[in-house]
Amino acid sequence: MFQDKCEQGKVVVIGAGLTGLSAAHRLVQLGEKDVVVLEADEAVGGLAGGCEAFGHTFDYGSHRLHIHSERDAIALAQNVLGEDLLRRVRRGKLRLKGRFIRYPPSLYDLTRSLGIGGSIKCLASFILAGIQRTNPPRAEDECYEEDLRRLVGDALYQAFYSPYALKVFGIHPSMVSTDAIKRRTTVTRPKEIIKDILRRSFFLSPKSEDYFYYPRQGCRSIGDALARKIREGGGRIYCGVQVKNVQWRGNRVLALLAESSGKPIRIVADAVISTMPVGDLVCGLDPLPDSRTATAASNLNWRAMKLIYLITKQPLREGSETFYFPESRYPFGRISVPGRFSRDMSSSQETTFCVEVICNYADAVWNAECDQLSRICIRELERLGLLRARDVVQTMSVGLRQVYPVYHSGWSAQLQVAQDVLDRLHNLISVGRGGLFLHSNIDHSIVMGQEAAEQILSSEEGRGWQERSARFRTFRVRD
Ligand SMILES: Cc1cc2nc3c(=O)[nH]c(=O)nc-3n(C[C@H](O)[C@H](O)[C@H](O)COP(=O)(O)OP(=O)(O)OC[C@H]3O[C@@H](n4cnc5c(N)ncnc54)[C@H](O)[C@@H]3O)c2cc1C
């Protein structure tokens, strides 16, 4: 419950996702006692949070800490979770051309799913793309579609990347910025693609990349453990408090206007680390800088996600923990089986599934009843042989409003307009997935939070943050 005495904080952190929690944890570690975290949701963790229902623990979608995560992030997770941070073998499956193949795939897997004819076509177009790559791209061709065609060839682009982009961004790939490629690990250089596929093809035993870290009790336990440490260190975390406006004068933020249980609250802050979506932050500035800035900020769009959780009375068996569905014929993008990440996530007598359906906030999918979406998902999962409809005993759905930043062409100019305004406020740092409009992973959030905390405590406050945070834009996302 938010109380009167908390209406002031030396450092106020907006958002208790992993960026905000890592920032607050670092502040407390560095000796700052007067730290207040304000979280709009009723629980901490943000996108890496989760929920409990029907005796099961669920993450918000398929979550793991990748083995090649930033070292500081792994160290922090190991520190707060100890032996509860498990090392697991990755057993992902990709659905392509009507077959399940290993994900990430080997040459054999790709040939199996594409067929001999399809594989030859892909190889030929990959080689052709390689020859054409020697010609420098024309500026007007620089978009996701053209760049990927140049990178992997038309056949692979059509089979995999084009439907994937449509699913994730919800716009035609010709309207997606080339930055969407730069944010991803596996598709940046043809040499890397070939090396990766060959390595998978000729080494049978798992290599280090085929593992991941996973908290025994679910991904949300990273956030829960951080929150515990923050409170032990004297920091205060308030859930159910939504920041609406940021009052500023000159080059400083003076106070935050928030709402808790329908009541307005004013929080005076010496310094602010904000992880709320940058568009919301800029549109909430009081006074609003100018209409051009507000328009640019409100054009930073997000894709939303509906998560459908299915509980079946099938006993949990060994198998893949995650299934990927890039093709448009499937209404979902990914399905995970929490019990296969950690036995503690599920009872041995039941198998739970988490189905990820990407959509737009307030569209027909978002507004659909759980029953309606569950029925569609169950029918597809039965066709795929993953479950039997008659075994499903419970269903539940959760909506996540701001999930994937939409990198449409022109997004970076709009972000820059918003960022320019924020850069003038020396005691404010906007960071994290939402704060930087960044498609990022858990480890990136942890590192961004830690660095924001160090910056805000330095004599520079937010000055110089632009340069320091430039490296965050080079983070590569892993699935
Ligand atoms: C389905 C899915 C699967 C993923 N899988 C992986 C994976 O396997 N591995 C991996 O490394 N990463 C994965 N990620 C990415 C990872 O979860 C995120 O990058 C990371 O959790 C983002 O943390 P954050 O704190 O930056 O942002 P968020 O988690 O978005 O936190 C921001 C917080 O701010 C709060 N907030 C927003 N507005 C306000 C306001 N006005 N007032 C107060 N609070 C506010 C929000 O409620 C939220 O809690 C996945 C993400 C998704 C969606």
Image (tube, grey):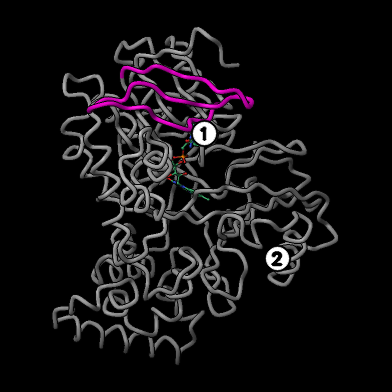
In front: label 1 or label 2: 1
10 Å neighbourhood of mark 2: few (<14), some, or many (≥20)?
some
Three-letter amino acid code at the position of disc 1: Gly
Residues in magenta? 241-270
Residue 381's tag is: 2
Which residue corresponds to the image point at 60% horizontal and 59% vertical from the top-left? 357
Q: Quadrant of the C terminus?
A: bottom left
10 Å neighbourhood of mark 1: few (<14), some, or many (≥20)?
many
Q: Kindly tell me whether mark 1's CB lies below 8 Å from ligand 1.
A: yes
Three-letter amino acid code at the position of disc 2: Leu
In this rendering, is residue 230 above or below 389?
A: above
Which residue, given by chain and number where applicable, does mark 1 sit on? 45
Marked residue nearer the N-terminal end (1 or 2): 1
Residue 358, x across and y down, in percent = 56, 60
Residue 149, x across and y down, in percent = 31, 80
Q: Quadrant of the N terminus?
A: top right
Which residue corresponds to the image point at 43% horizontal and 29% vertical from the top-left? 14
